[in-house]
């Protein structure tokens, strides 16, 4: 469960009536109340959050009158994408609907569920001595579960989203402006701009402190989205009872649950590398890690048992289409399995703790020297599997984010592509399964 949040005490504001908050976020957990930020005086607060239905909500001083309460019917449930959210406030506006503007990926979205606007000239909690928290409610509850990047606060101006982003002329997608220019105001700040820095990166020195939890740096960003596991995916061997954590990079199945999960990104061409740390497993041929055919994955009850999955199992066998063949070393807890997927030539390779199994050579190209499998085509992505409902397994994936769980890789290997950070050397010609990697 998420428990990380940031906080700082506000100084005298430029304006308690006019301000803008901007952040890029990538959700991990969904379907629960989660606060993006809150500003409180110890007994009441203003807050911007996800409701348990995954819609957005903003309220001002909900425990007293006058107050504001605004929410959306639109649901933000995509755990594979970064969202850009902007709240632009100006309670001096004569038109009530202009006093709090919400922008999602550059487009203004009308509050269409609850619509109680703030009163004219309403004073928000952007005031001296109040506490600004990011990632948590005023009380120790409703933690945000996911990633945040490029978090900005402008004190004194109601800004447009075009300050922080723009539409890509080629793709038509909303993209980040990594160095926005705006008048900060007294309480303005910029944090989490590059990595996990909570020292104010603007000229204001309005630094935050870590209020609780662990702040983990990740290579995943709005300008390069990395694969994670997909908690929204459900196959016939349902994910019910499985737990996803650490930004959906760790998956745990219970002793009475099956495990079948796949990544959020897949490829039809190109060469990709990622790693899986085994946190807990049982030496059995009905579990393992590997790849699967996304076009057919949802149709079947176990990718190792059908024609759409290719697995390296803890007992050292490789499994495909209900056929087990002796392949490599056994593996157990704390071992790291490397996966090299060559979609250009249709080959798949596995390593254990940096050693390619069966003397495989991912750099051999079209010859596919000692590959675990060949003739792999279609749309292929990462896969983890446990076909037993009586055993417990836990895997932590590193698609290039640079850590397993909350622990950074101990000795980063070489990576000629420059995309992602891995424990072991990335084979030449391979890269991370990320948006930049897919577009090389």
Image (cartoon, helix red, strand yellow):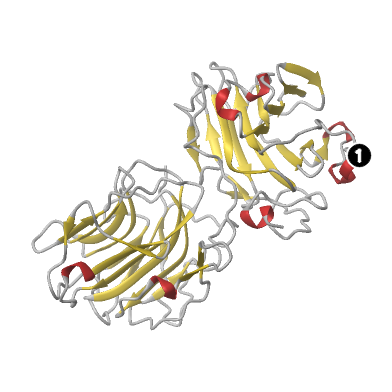
Q: Is residue 365 left or right of residue 260?
A: right
Asked if residue 261 is positioned above or below residue 205 in the image, the reply reads above
User: Residue, x 13% and y 62% (percent of image)?
Assistant: 67
Across and down, in percent, residue 255 comes to 51, 20
Depth check, front residue: 71 or 150: 71
Asked if residue 240 is positioned above or below residue 109 in the image, the reply reads above
Across and down, in percent, residue 379 comes to 66, 38
Across and down, in percent, residue 276 comes to 66, 39
User: Residue, x 61% and y 22% (percent of image)?
Assistant: 302
Depth check, front residue: 232 or 307: 307
Give the residue at mark 1: 367
Asked if residue 243 is positioned above or below residue 168 in the image, the reply reads above
> Where the C terminus falls, by quadrant?
bottom right
User: Residue, x 71% and y 25% (percent of image)?
Assistant: 313
Disc 1 on helix, strand or loop? Answer: helix
The answer to whether residue 343 shows anywhere in this view is yes
């Amino acid at each position: 469960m998420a428990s990380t949040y940031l906080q700082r005490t506000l100084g005298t504001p430029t304006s308690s009536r006019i301000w803008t908050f901007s952040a890029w976020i990538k959700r991990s957990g969904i379907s629960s109340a989660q606060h993006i930020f809150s500003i409180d005086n110890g007994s009441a607060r203003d807050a911007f959050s996800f409701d348990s239905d995954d819609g957005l909500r903003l309220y001002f001083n909900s425990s007293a009158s006058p107050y504001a309460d605004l929410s959306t019917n639109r649901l933000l449930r995509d755990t594979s994408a970064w969202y850009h959210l902007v709240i632009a406030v100006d309670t001096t506006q004569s038109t009530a609907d202009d006093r709090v503007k919400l922008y999602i990926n550059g487009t203004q979205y009308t509050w269409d569920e609850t619509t109680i606007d703030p009163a004219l000239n309403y004073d928000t909690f952007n005031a001296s001595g109040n506490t600004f928290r990011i990632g948590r409610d005023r009380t120790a509850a409703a933690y945000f579960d996911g990633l945040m990047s490029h978090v900005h606060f402008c004190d004194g101006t109601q800004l447009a989203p075009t300050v922080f982003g723009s539409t890509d002329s080629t793709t038509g997608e909303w993209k980040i402006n990594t160095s926005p220019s705006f008048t900060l105001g007294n309480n303005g700040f910029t944090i989490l701009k590059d990595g996990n820095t909570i020292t104010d990166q603007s000229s204001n020195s309005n630094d935050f402190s870590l209020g609780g939890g662990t702040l983990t740096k990740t290579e995943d960003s709005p300008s390069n989205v990395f694969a994670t596991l997909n908690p929204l995916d459900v196959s016939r061997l349902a994910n019910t009872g499985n737990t996803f954590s650490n930004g959906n990079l760790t998956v745990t199945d219970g002793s009475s649950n099956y495990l079948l999960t796949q990544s959020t990104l897949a490829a039809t061409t190109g060469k990709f590398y990622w790693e899986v740390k085994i946190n807990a497993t049982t030496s059995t041929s009905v579990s393992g890690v590997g790849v699967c055919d996304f076009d057919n994955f949802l149709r079947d009850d176990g990718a190792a048992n059908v024609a759409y999955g290719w697995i390296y199992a803890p007992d050292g066998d490789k499994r495909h289409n209900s056929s087990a063949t002796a392949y490599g070393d056994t593996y157990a807890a704390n071992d790291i399995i490397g996966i090299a997927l060559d979609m250009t030539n249709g080959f798949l390779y596995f390593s254990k703790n940096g050693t390619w199994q069966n003397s495989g050579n991912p750099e051999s190209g079209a010859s596919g020297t000692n590959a675990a499998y060949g003739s792999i085509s279609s749309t292929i992505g990462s896969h983890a599997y446990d076909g037993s409902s009586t055993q417990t397994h836990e895997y932590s994936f590193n698609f290039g984010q640079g850590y397993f769980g909350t622990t950074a890789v101990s000795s980063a290997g070489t990576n000629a592509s420059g995309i992602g950070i891995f424990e072991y050397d990335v084979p030449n010609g391979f890269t991370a399964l990320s948006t930049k990697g897919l577009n090389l």
